[in-house]
Amino acid sequence: MGIKKNDILQGTLALLILKTLASQKRVHGYAITVHIQRVSDQLLRVEEGSLYPALHRMEQEGWVRAEWGKTEKNREARFYSLTALGKKQLAQEEENWARLTEGVARVIRYA
């Protein structure tokens, strides 16, 4: 019944991606990784091998929409944006994160 490590990591990655998409209108995958790394002051790094499967999963769930377009360097790329369902999921992910961090904080404070 407990939460698996993989579930926590996937949930955290989903939260980071959804939050990034909520702060920007339309963004390609590489820009998502750059944003997360920059905003976290280089503490977090999302590898392509984790990012694209997560984006694909989120697209299948209906949380994000993807469409082809040109980057600022005139390269073809898939651009992602948040859907209405994705906004609801973001709220759920933020709530889950708050519960998880509160639980961890309680355990750490217990002495």
Image: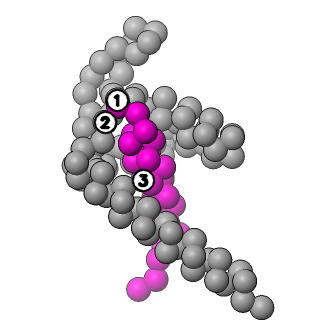
Residue occupied by mark 2: 81
Crowd around label 2: few <14 · some 14–19 · many ≥20 (10 Å): many
The kind of residue on which mark 1 rests is Arg
Q: Is residue 68 above or below residue 63?
A: above
Q: Are marks 1 and 2 in contact (CB under 8 Å)?
A: yes
Q: Which mark is residue 95?
A: none
The kind of residue on which mark 3 rests is Ala
Instruction: Tell me the quarter of the image containing the N terminus.
Output: bottom left
Mark 1–mark 3 distance (CA, rounded to whole Å): 16 Å
> Can residue 56 be seen here?
yes
- At x 46%, y 83%, the residue is 2
Q: Earlier in the sequence, mark 1 or mark 3?
A: 3
Badge 3 marks a residue whose secondary structure is helix
Residue occupied by mark 3: 14
Which range is magenta?
1-25
- At x 48%, y 49%, the residue is 16
Badge 2 marks a residue whose secondary structure is strand
